[in-house]
Image (cartoon, rainbow, N blue to C red):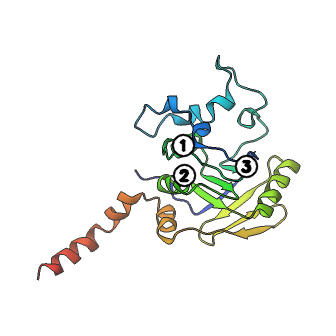
Amino acid sequence: MAYDKFTILKSSAVPMPIENVDTDQIIPARFLKATERKGFGDNLFRDWRYETDGTPKKDFVLNNPIYSGKILVAGKNFGSGSSREHAAWAIYDYGFRCVVSSFFADIFKNNSLNIGILPVQVSPEFLDKIFTAIEADPKAEIEVNLATQTITITATGASESFAINGYKKHNMMNGFDDIDYLQAMKEDIKVFAEKSLY
């Protein structure tokens, strides 16, 4: 399943300075019945966003109209717990294209990269700078440049580099999943296969 190419993302961000957010909090198990990636955004952080009767909880950040954007800024150890890929699906379906944290669970990180969400791991100090910038201005712009592997707070110019696997970077910049990557190499594979026969 191809997704939008990720090159440079400039956006305001939604702050959620909560540590140890696990995948059951991101998307509760009772919403895992569907096998397609669509529709999960409605239930992203369901138990934190809504009362049992479906009424939005006013004190939860996703229900606060002053915050918006394609970047979710989270506390340390985001995406821990079970390996459900539905957690990444819910984040993508909601509209986030990047999650920033000082630490990610490995499986969540890979699930995110596989569907077009860029997990940007920064130092705890830089994460604090981002939270401070958003607190000062809820519309503060964050720039994430995948080509240069940098994240920048536009207002202050503060910047930090981040790491990403080269193969995943290539796929993100081209909007490929693993199958798309192989499809793009189809002619090269065909030529190699023909040469191998002789």
Instruction: Determine which residue is flagged by label 3.
Output: 13
Image quarter (top left, top right, bottom left or bottom right) of the C terminus: bottom left
Q: Earlier in the sequence, mark 1 or mark 3?
A: 3
Q: Are marks 1 and 3 in contact (CB under 8 Å)?
A: no
- Image: 117 above or below 84: below
Q: Are marks 2 and 1 in contact (CB under 8 Å)?
A: yes
**102, 40: nearer the viewer:** 102
- Image: 173 above or below 41: below
Instruction: Determine which residue is flagged by label 1.
Output: 87
- Image: 89 above or below 157: above
Between marks 1 and 3 in the image, the one whose residue lies nearer the viewer: 1
Instruction: Determine which residue is flagged by label 2.
Output: 108
On the rendered structure, is 67 left or right of 135?
A: left
**Which amino acid type is shown beneath numbered disc 2?**
Phe
Q: Residue at x 16, y 76 (%)?
A: 194
Q: Residue at x 41, y 38 (%)?
A: 36
